[in-house]
Image (cartoon, grey):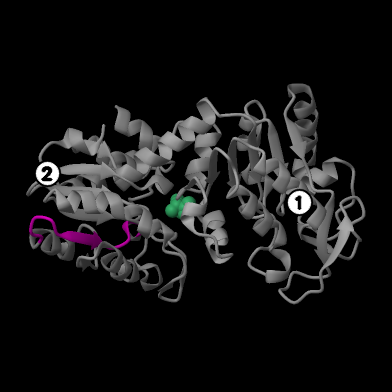
Amino acid sequence: KSIDDLGDLRGKRVIIRCDLNVPLDGDKITDDGRIRASVPTLTRLADAGAKVIILAHLGRPKGKPNPEFSLAPVAERLAELLGRPVAFAADTTGPQAREVVDGLADGEVALLENVRFDPREDSKDEAERAELARAYAELGDAFVSDGFGVVHRKQASVYDLAKLLPHAAGELVKAETEVLRAITEDPQRPFVVVLGGAKVSDKLAVIDNLLAKADSLLIGGGMVFTFLAARGFEVGKSLLEADQVETCRSYLERAGREGTEIVLPTDIVVAPEFAADAPPTVVAADAIPADQLGMDIGPESAAAFAEKIAGARTAFWNGPMGVAEFAAFAGGTRAVAEAMTKVDGLSVVGGGDSAAAVRDLGFADDDFGHISTGGGASLEYLEGKELPGLQVLED
Ligand code: 3PG
């Protein structure tokens, strides 16, 4: 269901779940991509005359109010981006929230404090979540789900609330799911997937599912060393998940059988320690010295990855190729980002961290076909899992 199905919104109190979980340095927002991505639906609702009430989380405050995780700085930035005031309530279902909501005129916007200050929001106990969802529902007449980054979470403001009010998917959730559906159901070929990031254990299910779908799987980042170990190479002091070596070996064997290629780097940038000023050295992937750790894929691998990506008709990328926040070890990530901008077809950058990394490296959002606001959510979609926050909208 889309917003049109909710009928005339003038004067209606519309609760919208957004994902405004942005990285902060103190109270300074270091990447406002998710706030910007929320603007189209919010503008549409406000322009339609709705009283717009935003629910969102920030970080993982573990069910307790904590000023470090306050959404107050987000309210300020949101007001700038929307070009209209955003009232902020310092609680979520308490007296302040009720007062702010009661004071809204048609077309006005309010942001309520971090939903995760209440332990019931992400409780495993369905009755607790339902109780909180009923309190949210008292504040509104309709519900719009637009926090794509949290649709994989069975939480009160994502899942349970949708059961209590007339509901619809927002523009962002619609756009994100359309892109991911196109990738998984009918990708233009060659379909190239690039995976990086620290832990292979976070990516096992996605590798498993994409081995049957992608033409090439390019692997970099910290997770690659477990694959290199599976090839029988020594990885020195690099990140290694010893308990996953066998699984990686089975993927390498399966890829051979299924006609999907798994491309691993042939050279690695190593350093003696994990530090921005550690001296970098390029070595062959099968000759990582025992006293060094891998910090990035090497230039030969970066060029080979870039060539594969640039030849794709569909490309999906999640996770940096190296320690991209240190300039000396950002080369692989930069090369992959650059190649993603050249795809003649659909290029999708998945995940908050990857999106922040490409913006940090100076790329603009419209250099890519689509930048997903969902890290975990986009990966779980690609794993072929049913996402509760999407499934509840279909019921
Ligand atoms: C994210 O950052 O991926 C989303 O905001 C979800 O956050 P969570 O992993 O803490 O649920």
On screen, residue 336 above or below 94: above
Front of the two marks 2 and 1: 1
Quadrant of the image containing the C terminus:
top left
Q: Which labelled disc corresponds to residue 303?
A: 1
Residue 43 % position (x, y):
23, 54
What kind of element bears circle 2?
A: loop
Question: Could you say which disc has been placed on residue 9 in the image?
Answer: 2
- Left or right placement of residue 277 versus residue 72 in this view: right
Task: Decide if residue 137 is in sight here.
Answer: yes
CB atoms of marks 2 and 1 within 8 Å: no
Residue 173 is left or right of residue 112, and the answer is right
Q: Is residue 232 above or below residue 222?
A: above
Say which quadrant the N terminus sits in.
top left
Looking at the rendered structure, the secondary structure element under dot 1 is helix
Horizontal side of 99 relative to 122 (left or right) equals left
Query: In which image quadrant can residue 198 be found?
Result: bottom right
Query: Where residue 34 appears, x then y in whole percent?
Result: 40, 56
Which label's residue is closer to the chain start, 2 or 1?
Answer: 2
| Frontmost residue, 136 versus 76 | 76
Image location (x, y in percent) of residue 30: 47, 69
Asked if the stretch drawn in magenta spans residue 164, the answer is no
Q: Crowdedness of circle 1 by 10 Å Cα count: few (<14), some, many (20+)?
A: some
Looking at numbered disc 2 in the image, what kind of residue is underneath it? Answer: Leu
Q: Image height check: is 95 above or below 179? A: below
Residue beneath the point at 52% across and 33% down: 183
The residue nearer to you, when weighing 378 against 330, is 330
Q: Which residues are magenta?
A: 104-116
Residue located at (65% from left, 59% from top) = 334
Residue 97 located left or right of residue 20: left
x, y percent for residue 214: 64, 31
